[in-house]
Amino acid sequence: MEEVTSIFGENVFNETVMKARLPKETYKSLMKTIQGGEKLDASVANVVANAMKDWAVEKGATHYTHWFQPLTGITAEKHDSFIAPTTDGKIIMEFSGKELVQGEPDASSFPSGGIRATFEARGYTAWDPTSYAFIKDGTLCIPTAFCSYTGEALDKKTPLLRSMQAISKQAVRVLHLFEGNENVTSVKTTVGPEQEYFLIDKSVYDKREDLIFTGRTLFGAKSPKGQELEDHYFGMIKPRVQAFMKDLNKELWKLGILAKTEHNEVAPSQHELAPIFSTTNIACDHNQLTMEMMKKVAAKHGMVCLLHEKPFAGVNGSGKHNNWSISTNTGKNLLDPGATPESNAQFLLFLCAVIKAVDEYQDLLRISVASAGNDHRLGANEAPPAIISIFLGEELSEILECIEEGKPYGTHKKEKMQIGVTVLPEFNKDTTDRNRTSPFAFTGNKFEFRMLGSSESIACANVFLNTVVAEELSQFADVLEKSANFKADLHELILKTIKEHKRIIFNGNGYDDSWVHEAEKRGLYNLKSTPEALRHILDEKNVKVFEKFGVYSKVELVSRYEIHNENYSKIINIEAETMLEMVRKDILPCASKYAGELAENISLKNSVSSFANSNIDSSYEVEMLKKNSSLTASIFNKTSQLEADLIEAKHIAIGGDSGKTAMFYHEKVFASMNSLRASVDELELITPKELWPYPNYGDLLFSVR
């Protein structure tokens, strides 16, 4: 493999390339936009476009695309070539500033939640100069925002950029109240999203209609071996997987993606990749590219990368841990407690802003991770529960308690870790343990939001998080900017926040059933499903906070409500239709064939018994035939019930209430699917493997050797 330092970012039109190829004044002007958030100078666009085109063509690119993130959850691109005709019948390679800055895809063909009618096709993509252009598959990709003809955001990036702007403005207001922050002009949120995924062999994937159509197994009896021995987690990486990871790293590094850590996860065939922190919008772009590259590279190795949150029942599903922090343009991490957090008032104020935001907007944070796939994980013994809470750890919790009770805090010195083996080096013990059961955990100098689903964009979670923290910082600034006694009022504000919002802090086991009851006593939300959570997105307080900072208008929020409900219903409908097809075409015929074989064997044994005047025992065949017939009848009846539920669901959908439709799919269709699955999985356990129409869980989970 080539030297990492030489290939890193080689396909990115990054700062180094811009500095080398752009005139000095153009470069300076563009850097003011990228680093300082200043408005882009229109005169810069043509110069940048020409330099970008020359660089891309030299690297073999013939086309460019405005690469954007519509509300489908994946990326989109429309390719145009650089060629332009000349008067002598030949062509030149051309790319203008106008083409760089603005594109025009069809807005009516993407989800809009009613913002755009089918006949209203015009939409615009707008260049995001803060996220570097890159070359992928021989095409120059220009990261862009996507909006409708009437200006509403139709993508995930536009609200993300708005939310970053909001938190920056409010954080700077607060920082300027503290000495030493005179040079702070902007604040950026940074994110390091850890990505979990499964790898299975393509040969078994191709035999599973459910995996092909839905990304998860709709049927499948438990394998004799799963994750019980906990031998896969951090275990030796298999050579075939190692080869995949090596090639994946290479492709990601070429795109300037800071892929850092890779390891086996808990479930068989499950793995994780973690990057180094990036500015949030860039981290979002990079995570979308990472998921795309995982699938492409896996295919080259004869494997399929599964990004669904729960591809297999009975083993851990896949999530995405969103490590979120806030930093100033001067390089200070605002969530770093320092050596003495108890006396670091600035840190404590920002910590309180996050605590207050998470408590007051629990519903929004739950909504930000809501999806049909993620509903399978949240609340199970593998992922945080659907209840939002904050883990702070022993030291910070004790500090806040001392502030609340007005008593001195006994500073904890760094404690040496005692392992009991003299040859091992001593090292300092962290001031707090980690809590993998917490959905929102403080982990030293950042918060780890652990509820995100593996297949989802990280944009929504960070839009919501940025916005609600901006709201609390805004409230804090409103109070403190009018203060006549800053230190006293600051202390009072921190004290008040702790008292009013400490209910959201929970350092215990989030998987324990007792937490559900405790959370209810505290008045915390427990929104177990996507339809239940989505009901709250249009609550007055939520609309108000988004409109206040211009992150979403009421129209844009309504569109998201409609889109997410419709998407949930469509996913459950596709899964249900796939189940019905698998049962009708494969599973019931398989059961009937096996029943015929059993009946034939019983008849044969009875004939031999009569002929030989001897009792030949057919109790096994009789018992299996009884079980087979009982389960076959159950499956047939449950299939009829699921069919009826789907008919009713489609009738409800005609009424146009997307929330009501989604709730019916959750309460009735999904329940019927689970009931049908239970009978099919039981049938699989008594059916000979050679008769069963699909690779079983053992074949799938241990297919990559």
Image (cartoon, helix red, strand yellow):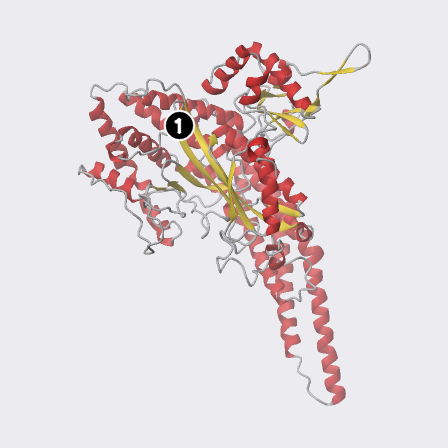
* Horizontal side, residue 241 vs residue 363: left or right: right
Q: Height in image: 693 above or below 594? A: above
Q: Which residue is more in the foreground, 446 or 148?
A: 446
The percent position of residue 18, horizontal first and vertical second, equals: 56, 19
- The residue that appears at 46% across and 30% down in the rendered structure is 463
Quadrant where the C terminus sits is bottom right
Residue located farthest toward the right when viewing the structure as drawn:
89
Q: Residue at x 27, y 35 (%)?
A: 341
> What kind of element bears circle 1?
strand
- Identity of the residue furthest to the left in this view: 407
Residue 117 visible in image: no
Q: Residues within 10 Å of mark 1 (few under 14, many from 20)?
A: some
Instruction: Give the vertical position of 448 relative to 633 (above or below).
Output: above
Residue at (67, 43) in percent of width and height? 300
Which amino acid does the dot numbered 1 rest on? Ser
Residue 512 to residue 541: above or below: below
- The percent coordinates of residue 541 (x first, y second) are 39, 30
Q: Is residue 601 shown left or right of residue 565?
A: right
Q: Nearer the viewer, residue 524 or 352?
A: 352
In the image, taking residue 224 as reference, residue 167 lies left or right, namely left
The residue under label 1 is 327
Residue 366 visible in image: yes
